[in-house]
Structure formats: structure tokens, C-alpha cells
Amino acid sequence: MKIKLNDMATSGILMSESSKLYEEAMKVLVGGVNSPVRAAIRPYPFFVREGKGPYIFTVDGQRLIDYVLGYGPLILGHAPEPVVKRVMEYINRGWLYGAPTEIEVALAKKIVSHFPSIKKVRFVNSGGEAVATAIRLARGYTKRRKILKFEGCYHGAIDYVLVKAGSAAAHFGTPSSAGVPEDVAKLTLVARYNDLDSVERVMRSEGNDVAAIIVEPVMANYGVIPPREGFLKGLREIADKYGALLIFDEVVTGYRLGLGGAQRYYGVSADITTLGKIIGGGFPVGAVGARDEIMDLLSPRGPVFNAGTFNGHPISMIAGLATIDVLETTNAYDIAISASRRLAEGINDVLSRSGIDHVVNWVPTMLQVFFTKGEVIDHETAGKSDTKLYLRLHEELLKRGVFIAPSQFEAMFTSSSHTSDVVEETLRQIEDSVKALKQV
Ligand SMILES: *Cc1c(COP(=O)(O)O)cnc(C)c1O
């Protein structure tokens, strides 16, 4: 397939539709957007008219090959036929009852079949809600107060995890957002990703009061940073040693690294798993899963409260179910994984030839390039990369019809709609973009 470059789209004439909308948006939405990364596109975000397969089409008529994919959920690309069909079928029946439907049972069964550590599921409405519920469950189960997280891991916009490392001497964290009380942040301990010694140090002094260690099994909200050999297994052992639960936040890795998520891919089991993104097929969703003994503490069975008007929303459930059906029965993963691998290799080649310092981190269907020397293994090494150069790459690519996230600290995602033609076209645009980077 040939991608037509729409030169006019960047000339400032056709972009004016987005710019007009942005001006309107700025008056009534904070920063013109509803989630901050969307405002990072300069000079203003493009507004989207529609998406199909690997493409999004802006209101200004530009076609973009999309490697953002809604920040992860769209593993089949935009508006895949089988999902559209099931959603249309179900939406005509009505969509909210305050009573159970068979669809949520079917989706829960799928998840239980793919994750051996999960015997029951609670569906909520976002990844952040899933994390809040998982933490409450861990506290209810262990009757302990503290949690341990990793610097640079993202777990949603909720107080307990909007916490960064405090002073070097202290183990406890400080708020990474205004409005999060110090007292709340103090209950969150912070260690360094891929560094078991840092975990052991914190646990040695605080372990008896730690309800859970929570981790992104692949750090995917600080670029993409895979776990080192033995890191996840080491966390499993440390959690067991101190009687803490291990929470894998698989909101993004779940169904991206394959049907069993990071747990199957790396062969390490969590006590509590959070899911989201893909399991709603692009509709709002979150889920918590664990063994019966833990899950049965949730209301209505147990004393740990959770409820939600939209929990198990039928349309999210059917879209998730349809997506997982496709992942189970077709070669969707093969295509999405090949695309991510080819893209990672291709970017590496182009940058190596150009002599620009870089690191490309890859896991199945996710990757990111960092402009730095040496490896990127945690927040500190990632933080050394040239974020301005990354942004310029993003801008050069956007001019050439390719959309990657406007932040170094996000991931590139692939889908089953990113066929080899689409990826090769992307690599040609990357080649040209890197040439443009070198010309200043
Ligand atoms: C996206 C994400 C979240 C938050 O999910 P929302 O649906 O945006 O609330 C939490 N954890 C991880 C690992 C994520 O990638």
C-alpha cells in the first residue's frame, strides 16, 4: 500500500481546522485536552476525524500511520471488522442494566483461562481503578498499610501511586502531584526498577508492614524498559519472604505480550493482576484478578469494598471479548509482533548508519527508541536520553504521515493491521526523518 503524503496538511492552511478546534477546546477543556500527553503535540494537537486499520485521519485530511493506538489498547488497529460487528449487534439491545449479563461471564472465563494466577475477576472502568482496587485488596488481605512501587512505573492517576522517591536516606516517597497528601505518599515506598538490592534494602527495614509490591512487569510508561533476567523472579521471592503480595500491573502488558501477559511470557506468577486497555477492545475498562482466597475478600463476598455503576459495561465487555477471540483464533499476534520487531531493527539500522547515539528497547508489540549511549534499564538511564531529539523525530515523522507518541517516555505500539507494507513505508519515512534531524 502506498501512503500519500499530504504536504498541505502541514502548511498551516489545512491544519487550520485543528487549530480552530484547539482554540475552542482551550476555552472549555483544561489545556484543550482531557489527558495531558495529548497536549504535547506542537504547535497544537491535530484533531482526529476517524481511524481505520493502522491509520488515523485528521480533521485536516492528513492520513497518519498510527503507532500510538490509543496508548496501547488497539492491538487489532482501528475499527476492526469483528469488533465493530459484535458491538453493533449488542448496542441495539440496550447497554446498561444494573444487573449482570452473560458477556461479563464470558470475558472473565477467557481471562481465567489465560492467566493461571487468576481464578476470579472484578471488572472496573479503568486501569487506575483496577490498581486502586488491587491495593485495597492487598491491604485488606495482609492487614498491612504500606506498598512498594518502583520509580518510573506508572499505575494510573490515583493518589497511592502518584509518588516518587523521597530523600536518598528515606525509603518512603513524596507526592509526584499536588493534591496528594504527604501522609498518603509516606505509605508508599519506592525502589529502583531492575535493582533487587534496592528492594531488599527497603523490605529489610519496612517489610513487615508492606502489603504489596506493585510493579509493571515491563516498564512501559517510561519508554519501554524490559525486566532484566531474574528481576521478576527475584521480586516473587522477596514478596514471599516478607509475606507481602506481588501485584503485576498488566494493564498494558496483559494481552500485548501474548495471551497470558507478562506472567506467561516471563514465567513468573503474581498474586494480584491488574488488567485494562486491550481487554476492553478500546472501550473503557479495568480488571482485577487473583486466586479465590484473595478475590473473595471483595464486596459482596467480603469486607473490602468495590462498586461501580459502569463495572462490567456490556459494550466494553463485548468489544474485549471480540478482540480476544481474534487474538486466539487468527495470526493477529504474529503480524503485530513481526511489525514491532521489524520496526525496532529498522530504526536501529537507520540510526546506526547515521551515527546518532541510541538504544532501541523491544518486547513483543511494544518498543521505544532512546537517544542515549549505553543501556536503558531504569528511570535514571532512561532520563539521560535526549528528549528534545526524540521530539524532533516525532515532529519530522508527523510531517511525513507517521504518528509516534509526542514524548520519549511513552511506547510505540504495533497492531495486527501493521502489515509489512505499512512497516516498510514507515521505515522509509524514518530514514528521511533522521536525515532531516542531521541537517541542523
Ligand atoms: C495505562 C496504564 C494504567 C492506567 O490505566 P487507565 O485506564 O489510563 O486508568 C495503569 N497501569 C499501567 C501499567 C498502564 O499502562
Image: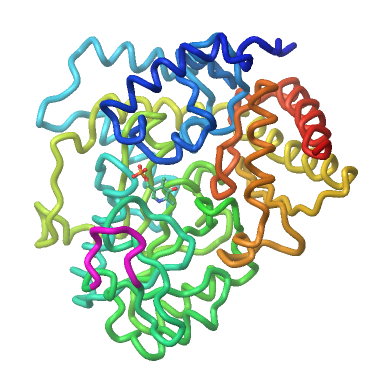
Instruction: Give the residue at x 58% y 59%.
Output: 266
Instruction: Give the residue at x 73% y 57%.
Output: 372
Q: How is the image coloured?
A: rainbow
Q: Is residue 176 magenta?
A: yes
> Where residue 17 sits in the image (x, y, percent)?
46, 11
Judge from the rendering whether residue 435 lies leftward or rightward of residue 294; answer left or right: right
> Where residue 111 sits in the image (x, y, percent)?
38, 43
Judge from the rendering whether residue 279 lies leftward or rightward of residue 381; answer left or right: left
66, above or below 299, in the image: above
> Where residue 392 sits in the image (x, y, percent)?
67, 38
- Looking at the figure, which quarter contains the N terminus? top right
- Looking at the figure, which quarter contains the C terminus? top right
Residue at the bottom extreme? Answer: 205
> Where residue 321 sits in the image (x, y, percent)?
38, 30
Q: Quadrant of residue 49?
A: top left
Instruction: Give the residue at x 45% y 32%.
Output: 324
Q: Which residues are magenta?
A: 174-182
Q: How many marks?
A: 0
Judge from the rendering whether residue 265 lies leftward or rightward of residue 27; answer left or right: right
17, above or below 171, in the image: above
Q: Residue 72 versus residue 376: which sits nearer the camera?
A: 376
Instruction: Give the residue at x 49% y 22%.
Output: 46
Q: Quadrant of residue 292?
A: bottom left
